[in-house]
Image (cartoon, rainbow, N blue to C red):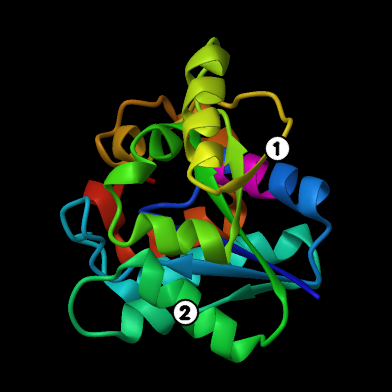
């Protein structure tokens, strides 16, 4: 059995996230995909958007296939969310499964700064998605470094779709572009709850 973890703040999820997860699913062919919005990530400020709304927005990912589930495990946990703890939980939930975790290229380059990163490498295969054009050389160097530390890394081959949740929250995209970037279920949650300064 193959289980793929796709975590992030998802504040909000957008077409770039959908693109990255689809590419990872094509590469891995997982039996189950767990989309897991972060609770309080250790490397970022906590999201100002309540966890239940980010969970609701993440329902958009279910359009990618019946194997996609949205997990509230990290949102429900008290304190900071460390990937090591999440992976340990998945090992218990899916004993004997091959675990995969999709990450962006920015995270690959700083992976050796993560909490218990060597143990994570022993537990999962990293599925890397490029975040910006032209970062291939840096990614290969980072991947080689982690492979030398015992890591298993594969690359999800998909065109880069440049988009950032922070830019969406800041209102940097015109309405026509927003319509392209926000899946309808996400736009609906934003509209109904007046998120991001009533962006929509």
Disc 2 to disc 1: CB gap under 8 Å: no
Q: Is residue 197 left or right of residue 144?
A: left
Q: In the rendered image, is residue 9 in sight?
A: no
Extreme-top residue of the structure? 134
Q: Nearer the viewer, mark 2 or mark 1?
A: 2
Residue assigned mark 1: 156
Query: How far apart are labels 2 and 1 at the CA level?
Result: 24 Å
Residue assigned mark 2: 88
Q: In the rendered image, is residue 93 in sight?
A: yes
User: Which residue is at the front of the view, 84 or 198?
Assistant: 84
Quadrant of the rendered image containing residue 11: bottom left
The magenta span reads: 17-21
Up/down of 128 relative to 177, above or below: below
Q: What x and y, as percent, mark residue 181?
A: 54, 37
Residue placed at 67% from the left, 87% from the top? 95
Secondary structure beneath dot 2 equals: helix
Magenta stretch prevailing secondary structure: helix
Magenta region includes residue 110: no
Q: What x and y, as percent, mark residue 166?
A: 30, 38
Residue placed at 72% from the left, 77% from the top? 97
């Amino acid at each position: 059995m193959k289980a793929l973890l796709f975590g992030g703040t998802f504040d909000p999820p957008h077409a770039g996230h959908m693109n990255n997860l689809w590419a990872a699913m094509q590469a891995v062919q997982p039996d189950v995909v767990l989309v897991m919005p972060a609770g309080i990530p250790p490397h970022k400020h906590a999201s100002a958007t309540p966890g239940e709304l980010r969970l609701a927005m993440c329902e958009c990912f279910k359009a990618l296939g019946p194997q996609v589930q949205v997990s509230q495990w990290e949102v429900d946990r008290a304190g900071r969310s460390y990937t090591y703890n999440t992976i340990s939980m998945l090992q218990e939930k899916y004993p004997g499964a091959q675990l995969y975790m999709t990450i962006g290229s920015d995270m690959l380059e700083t992976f050796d700064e993560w909490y218990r990163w060597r143990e994570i490498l022993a537990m999962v295969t990293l599925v890397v998605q490029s975040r910006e054009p032209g970062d291939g050389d840096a990614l290969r160097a980072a991947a080689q470094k982690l492979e030398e530390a015992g890591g298993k890394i594969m690359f999800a081959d998909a065109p880069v779709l440049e988009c950032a949740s922070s830019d969406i929250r800041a209102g940097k995209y015109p309405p026509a572009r927003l319509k392209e970037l926000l899946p309808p279920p996400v736009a609906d949650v934003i509209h109904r709850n007046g998120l991001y300064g009533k962006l929509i």
